[in-house]
Image (spheres, helix red, strand yellow):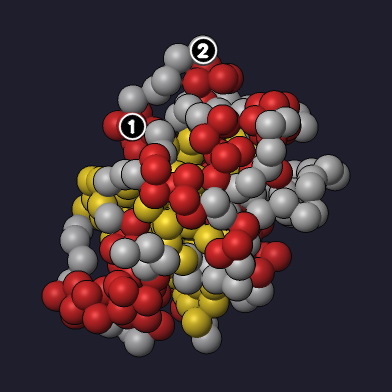
Amino acid sequence: MQTWRFIEDGPQDGAWNMAVDRAVLASREAGESPPTLRVYAWRAPTVTLGRFQSVNDVDLMYCVMRGFDVVRRPTGGRGVLHDDEVTYSVVAGIADGMPRGVSASYKLLCGALAATYQTLGVPADLTARAHGEKGSGACYLHATPADLSLGAAKLSGSAQVWEHDSVLQHGSFVRSRDTDAEASVFRLGQEGSGRLRAATATLSDVLGDVPPSESIITAVRKGFESTLGIKLEPDRLTDSEVRYAEACVDEFRLMP
């Protein structure tokens, strides 16, 4: 059985979270670190934009007024407002049994996410949802083949980037959602909050209560270990990864 590193971080600055994910990917591709599953949170509500997404999709003045951070992700996809959630990132390579290519790797890793939801009592499925707002800058109104859904409602999405033979994938387990704030962030207009409520589901929506973050993290570990056939060993970032993240953290900041 292969052993992977498991890192549990508390709430962190948004740009730092993205820089760490990028640092772990670079370190794994260089053969300096083991495959890694990391879970973390956000020091303040944070908007992450996809690697190629326009900052014009976001109402920056609203974010300043609310004290929200805005950062760039190293991965693609649409914008996400991160707040009451547990965020995960996984970094692994072809040598670790990761299938090459976006579709195959999404299918494998999202299987672990589905197992996590099922451990929590949520019968989530990896489905290519048929409906989505193609022009929206908000991830949760956009349908992709990597969505974890409960029926027609999107529970979570994932984003990826490959570095030669290694992949970074990250996403969120949303405990609860402020759809009014999310609609304002992404300039969705007065009806946007209702569209978000209709198109999405959170853990509290399904379970009737907000599960503790510790329960979600335990389920994440079980989901990945059982699906991938691995053992997760608690560990920390290497000194080299910390230096790498420190060197690139400002690249991810979109606000002072």
Which residue is located at x 19 percent, y 61 percent?
A: 236
User: Does residue 9 appear left or right of residue 28 in this picture?
Assistant: left
* Residue at numbered disc 2: 208
Which residue, given by chain and number where applicable, does mark 1 sit on? Answer: 213
**Residue 141 locus on image (x, y percent):** 70, 44
Whether residue 232 is visible here, answered yes or no, is no
Question: x, y (%) of residue 98?
Answer: 54, 69
Q: Is residue 129 above or below residue 160?
A: above
Q: Secondary structure at mark 2?
A: loop
Q: Earlier in the sequence, mark 2 or mark 1?
A: 2
Please tell me whether residue 106 is drawn above or below residue 180 in the rendered image.
Answer: below
The residue depicted at 50 percent of the width and 21 percent of the height is 204
Would you say 9 lies left or right of 39 here?
left
Residue at x 56%, y 30% (from the top left corner): 180
Seen at 37% across and 76% down, the residue is: 251
Number of other residues with Cα within 10 Å of mark 2, as a class: few under 14, some 14 to 19, many 20 or more? few
Q: Where is 48 relative to 119, above or below?
A: below
